[in-house]
Image: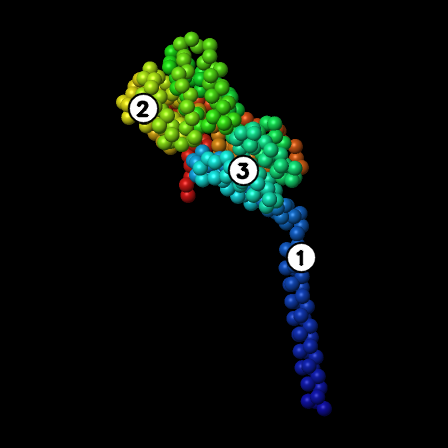
Amino acid sequence: MSRTWWKWVIYAGSIAALIVSASFTIYCAWKVYAYHQPGEGAAAEAEKNAFHFVLVPEELDNDYWRLVEQGAKAAAKETGVYLEYAGPRQANIDEHIHILEKAAASKVDGIMTQGLTEKEFTPVINHIVEKNIPVVTIDTDAPTSKRTAYIGTDNYYAGFIAGRALEEDMHGKANVAIITGSFTASNQQLRVQGFKDAVKEEKGIHIVAVEESHITRVQAAEKAYNILKKHPEVNAFYGTSALDAIGIAKVVEQFHREKGTYIIGFDTLPETIRYLQKGTIHATVVQEPYEMGYRAVKMMVDIRKGNNVPSVINTETKVIRKQDLPLRPSRNYEVNHD
């Protein structure tokens, strides 16, 4: 009888221990489950990671566009969005448009790109927007399109201040050759027109030639070489794309005309800065590519959240010379290739 009693005690104790253990396991599981339920913080985190944006540059490996990319990636990291950087290896309008169309077909949440030409880009941008995908233009606007906003340089103003800088530095007397990245890209056209308007009242300044480089150092150098052979009286050059002044500087040094030829260009690629420090390039128009990319992503997040944004934001543009080096903040001028 006593043995049977002890068996019942052991049996009851085992059941009680099992119940306590199971209860504790259920309690812990509930705590873990409750802890990971999406409260306000988790919902906000999910919203931050809900967007997929694409940045389509004019040239994938262009250092200027790498700065735009770096700014965009910094903003994407801060806001938790997924950002793709996809574009043509070298400037190619057909390939550029194809990449835009592919991004739209993938139903991304927003596209950031240039509005390079009115004829080709406006219909594409309109088609994308009609699919309920917002477009923000960077660096070059498409003002007649249905794009939501533009952020970047006022390209006419940039050309105008370049003209005023040349007029000041050359004391109102110069025979100028212009080498532009593209005859058809609207940003390049505006930079040329702004420059022309800035110097048109100066009787001592004559524009001798305007040539196209197709945004390559090689063709910029080739055009500069031909100009100096055909027009030896040229004593000033204006390059409207980031690579033009570099190509011009190479040729000017080849002709040993550094002391007698004034060069003003665009942007702050490492080669441009080296020529500026040497004195071969005398001035360059500085833009804010990092800021363009950074603020474009922030703006796109606002657009997707239904917030109102300005239709145009012009980033700072100025002319700098050797005495203005080094430039700060460096993030707008120094490419990080890591």
Between circles 3 and 1, the one closer to the viewer is 3
- Judge left or right: residue 327 versus residue 278: right
Q: Is residue 309 above or below residue 1?
A: above
> How many marks do you count on the picture?
3
Query: Residue 279: x, y in percent?
Result: 33, 23
Between circles 2 and 3, the one closer to the viewer is 3
Q: Residue at label 3?
A: 97
Give the class, few, some or many, for how many residues have Cα within 10 Å of label 3's Cα (few <14, many ≥20).
some
Amino acid under disc 1: Ala
- Res. 252 mark: 2
Query: Residue 295: x, y in percent?
Result: 55, 34
Residue beneath the point at 59% across and 46% down: 106
Pick whichever of labels 2 and 1 is earlier in the sequence. 1
Query: Residue 208: x, y in percent?
Result: 39, 16
Q: Using the image as rendered, state which of residue 154 and residue 322 is in the foreground.
A: 154
- Judge left or right: residue 109 versus residue 318: right
Q: CA distance from mark 3 to mark 1?
A: 48 Å
Q: CA distance from mark 2 to mark 1?
A: 72 Å
Q: Is residue 223 above or below residue 43?
A: above
Amino acid under disc 2: Val
Pick whichever of labels 2 and 3 is earlier in the sequence. 3
- Res. 34 mark: 1
Asked which quadrant contains residue 219, the reply is top left
Q: Quadrant of the C terminus?
A: top left
Give the class, few, some or many, for how many residues have Cα within 10 Å of label 1's Cα (few <14, many ≥20).
few
